Amino acid sequence: MGDIVATIQAEQDAIIRADLTGALVVQGGPGTGKTAVALHRAAYLLYAHRRVLERSGVLLVGPSRTFLRYIDQVLPSLGETGVVTTTVAELVPGLVARAEEDEAVAEVKGRSVMARVLSRAVSQRQRVPRETTTVRIDGRTVHITPSDVQSAIARARRHHRPHNQARVSFVRDMLSRLAEQYVAQLGWEVPADERAEVVEELRTTREVRIALNLAWMPLTPQGLLRELYAKPWRLERAAVELSARDRALLAREPEADWTPADVPLLDELAELLGEDDQAARAQAKADAQRRASELEYARRVLESSGAAAMVSAEMLADRFSASGPSLTTAERAAADRSWTYGHVVVDEAQELSAMAWRVLLRRVPTRSLTIVGDVAQTTARAGTRSWSSVFDPLLREQWRLAELTVNYRTPSSVAQAAGRVAAAAGLPVSALTSARDVPDALRVERAEPADVATLVAQRARAALTQVQDDQGAGRVAVIAPAAHLARVQQALDELESSGEVPAGPTRGRPAGRRRIWTHPRAAHARRGQGAGVRRGRAGRTRRRPGRERGRPVRVDDPSHAGAARGARPAAARGVRATVRVTDRVVSEGRAGSTIGTCSRPCCSRTSILRPGRSSRPPAST
């Protein structure tokens, strides 16, 4: 990060120092320094607008907890510690959402229409009974009629308060109507101060409680969402905009764990339902009792010490209550779901769904945001391919676009080939100029389909011979489509068993141990947890937190995580060459699958092997 500070370029500096107001969207291709710019902008804004931001704080949203651990190390080096770092899955305090689900399910949950579905699901829990309920209390009869319930519901909705808060008004109105019926049967006038006893008697009557709860049930976000998923008939009534197939995708058991795509829905429901003020009232009562106890203790202390003339009991009690630990703004904000921030920074923003954007915008009512990403690198089905399609409806004219155009990481020849691949796939590729090139950075070889796996193993062996040093440090990444994995693995096993794999230790691991990655999109499909990765025998495989598509990377130490996001690595021990298997031509302007290279400066060679006619000469790009 120190190297980045020393080499901030003009277009990056202009973004860092841009105005605080409004939403600034930073579009940039791979290697343009988007994350570094976002972090420096957060630090700059906290410095330049400290009075505004120190009270409300800054929220930084990243793609994964691994990435945020890197951020938590970088921001203090920039002089800032008052930033809350989180993922979308962690935005609701106390909620654990780590379960995995199919991308098709997450895409349905991420649609903006789900906001209407949830709103309708809440309103459907405010129901008018079909028949009158009769309740006997102390020999007198009261009737809970559909007309009274309908009138009370309409009056409670008139104030547009959240469900649980509006329920208080509904219950109060209904109890008042029932009390009128009860008093009318007494035959004498009941003073106003005694009517409270009648209301309390009605409120504590079991049959009345059941009838009022059936008409307007107190709800929790978790309970309502679980019920929608588990009861198809409820989901069908609420989700009229979804097809039968989409509703079937959402179905699951009530005890199923929460997924990251559930968090925006739960946050939306928390807004629609509101907090039940019974807990707040209980807390206020407990606080008052504690304050009275502190005052009584302070009085006894002053009486026994004879210091009553110098200090009051209130002052001494205040000193007692202030002697405990004091939370920082960031700590208080992280523990409060309803906290609103002065500024929000979002990295890898192209991956966020429409519902996730609703969550973030609720946390920054000033609409002051820094949003960085690349719409050409979107992998999530619920993500976006167009900034305007996301922000025009949400922010109207309150957002502006800035672009980063210089690629400081990938050699020019590789970047150009990747650009052609992406353009041929119809992706919205940004114009990029690479700051460097490396001779022989990209090679394309053709082979007969039956010989591809063997040739890949041989190229990997040759690359390993070139990159390993005297201590055996240095690795080679082999990336292949899922259909080729078994054949490539077998070819590598045969080379190892024949003794042709170079010997020597590699960071404490036996020589010849290796990993095979599938296509980067397949590996990313399950959020970097090893999905689609064929494991070798050396332990776990981890993908770097930046999730930059088209740059397969073996991450084996924390320093590489920083390198993958723009910081210079602490040690030059990582993937130094990449061998790629593809089924299509990636030369002569014809595009195939995405090209990948390591993001580290030491990794500059990529070989692409494809089935073809072995008699044709190798083509290089």
Image (spheres, rainbow, N blue to C red):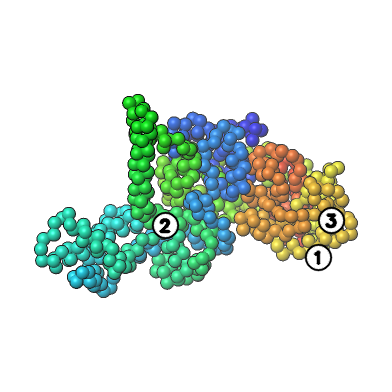
Q: Amino acid at mark 3?
A: Gln
Q: Which residue is mark 1?
A: 450
Q: Which residue sits at x=38%, y=34%? A: 301
Q: Which residue sits at x=78%, y=64%? A: 487
Residue 304 visible in the displayed image: yes
Between 34 and 196, the residue placed more toward the observer is: 196
**Which quarter of the image is occupied by the N terminus?**
top right
Q: Which residue is mark 3?
A: 458
10 Å neighbourhood of mark 2: few (<14), some, or many (≥20)? many
Residue 244 x/y as whole percent? 47, 71
Q: Which residue is mark 2?
A: 269
Between 86 and 105, the residue placed more toward the observer is: 86
Regarding mark 1 in the picture, which secondary structure is present there? helix
Which numbered disc flags the more N-terminal residue, 2 or 3?
2
State yes or no: discs 2 and 3 in contact (Cβ < 8 Å): no
Between 110 and 424, the residue placed more toward the observer is: 110
